[in-house]
Amino acid sequence: MSKKFYVHSIPGVALSTIAIVLAVMSLAPVQAQTYTGVLTWHNDNQRTGQNLAETILTPANVNPKQFGKLFTYPVDGQIYAQPLYVYGVTIPGQGAHNVVYVATENDSVYAFDADGLTTTPLWQVSLILNGGSAVPCGATGACSGISPVIGITGTPVIDGLSGTLYVVAFTAESGTWIQRLHALDITTGAEKFGGPVVIQASVSGTGGGSVGGKVTFSAIHESQRTALLLSNGIVYMGWGTFAYAPWHGWIMGYNAQNLQQVAVYNDTANGKRGGIWNSGSGFAADIEGNIYVMTGDGTFDANTGGSDYGDSFLRLTPTGPNGLSVADYFTPFNQAYLSTNDLDVGSGGGMIVPTQTGSYPDEIIGAGKEGMIFVVNRDNMGGYSSTTNNNIQTVTSSSNGFWSSPAYWNGLVYYAGSAGTLSAYSLTSGLLSTTPVAQSTTTFAFPGATPSISANGSTHGIVWVIQDTGGLPKGGPAAVLRAYQATNVAKPLYGSSQQGTRDVLAPGTKFSVPTVINGKVYVGTQTELVIFGELSAGAAN
């Protein structure tokens, strides 16, 4: 049956004009849905960790009486990746849902109803192929970090325009170790763009493991720990080491629409080590597409014309024959000491802060195992000097170092170092306070914690932290979700251990980061996804 359209006259508008508009509308394609939510590690590509649109959770209702565990979803492996969240996803045959996406070390990806409206996954896919399995940790020598198997560790990233989730899975297949990049439809979990693709790469170099002037990526030596980054249509990811030498720090980039490799970078191609792992952080990116990376212990010779950048901050641009090139860098004056004593600069990730007043408007902040917080000028990073640090500011902080990344809100920078407190530093005209303006009374054991922020713009700020209580690599005591008043972290609001067994978590995972959105907090553990919120808003499954 044909459809009839009735055009009524509009005062002052000719019918011919209306007809033309309708004709254009009939020819125009329907605009695809743009998905929103928490689509990447720590909420944004600047890695600030802040959700400024949280209107439900406030310091007034986040307390042990009104706030707690709502429901849980069991999973088939440990959750090291941060949960991601998308509003209003239409799942075929199941209607529209707010969806939380979870990846496990058993190489599974789950889509759950984020509000507890179902008790089973909306969909679940295994990324294990060819009769293989997730990789036994003993094969990598890394059982002290992740046990018993290693599969998906780096946090995926979601493209809100195409509705695609990108994730790297590690599998064992008939004695072969393979890492693949998958592109999954967020509505079904189906593979997209001809994926998955096996991750392979080589660069010119004479460094560790080189053969005939080439250094080749080795899946069994390289741990894909960093969260994925989607920037200007390219999906970037980084690698450090599991345990076995030789290893290097690798970064690769793939076209988000066809999964073709467009960028390869090795930070110690003529040397060794230099792992890029960042305790699970994702690379920071600016609006121009520059990528900011912090590297681990390894060879450094860039100051003498070489190309090795151990223990450094790097600004990489998507140019050059390999698709990435170093445009600028900063290396601490004591790099040789840091490298010799396993004091990685890149044990945490960098955070781009909002534009500052003063002499240095464009800054990135990061810290490593030595316990120094570095404030670096992104426009002129400072290079290397053997006698002094040529960055904006170096603040002596955690005596036990950092295996974590900062968060930012309303002129405050938050850090939780290893065996230290949650500390807030003021950031004024681009300079950090030299001591914290507030500290928690709680001490966070190794490896510390990476905080997240929820707020309604510049009000109702809350700092959320998952406290690891020594449950690694497998089993152990429960993790603890903690919340603090963001304007003064000396004031705790909530702890999941405060109400007996009501809110107790399963054992936690190293470097775990909570996801806070739409009145709920999502926490990954070794056995399940746990969802917290206002107790009147839901009941336990």
Image: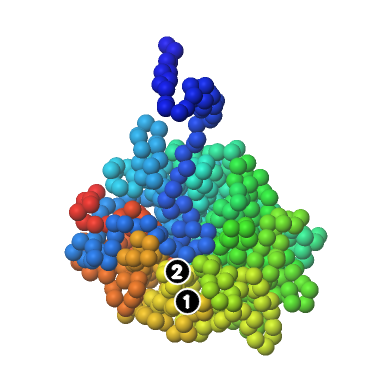
Q: Which amino acid does label 2 sit on?
A: Tyr
Residue 417 spot, x, y in % from top left: 44, 76
Residue 334 spot, x, y in % from top left: 64, 84
Report, in whole angstroms, how far the alpha carbon at label 2 lies from the one at label 1.
Answer: 9 Å
Q: Please name whichever residue, 529 or 348, is drawn nearer the observer in this view of the structure.
A: 348
Residue extending furthest right?
A: 212
Q: Please name whichever residue, 61 or 278, is drawn nearer the observer in this view of the structure.
A: 61
Q: Please name whichever residue, 220 or 340, is drawn nearer the observer in this view of the structure.
A: 340
- The residue pinned by badge 2 equals 408
Q: What element carries label 1?
A: strand
Residue shown at 24% from the left, 49% from the top: 541
Q: What residue type is labelled 1?
A: Leu
Instruction: Tell me, yes or no, whether the two marked residues, 2 and 1, touch with CB atoms within 8 Å.
Output: yes
Q: Name the front one of labels 2 and 1.
A: 1
Q: Quadrant of residue 435?
A: bottom left
- The residue pinned by badge 1 equals 427
Q: What element carries label 2?
A: strand
Q: Which is nearer the N-term, disc 2 or disc 1?
A: 2
Residue shown at 52% from the left, 21% from the top: 16
Q: In which quarter of the image is residue 481?
A: bottom left
Residue shown at 27% from the left, 66% from the top: 59
Is residue 522 in view?
A: no
Residue shown at 23% from the left, 52% from the top: 537
Q: Please name whichever residue, 211 or 405, is drawn nearer the observer in this view of the structure.
A: 405
Label 2: few (<14), some or many (≥20) within 10 Å? many
In the rendered structure, the answer to whether residue 391 lies left or right of residue 397 reads right
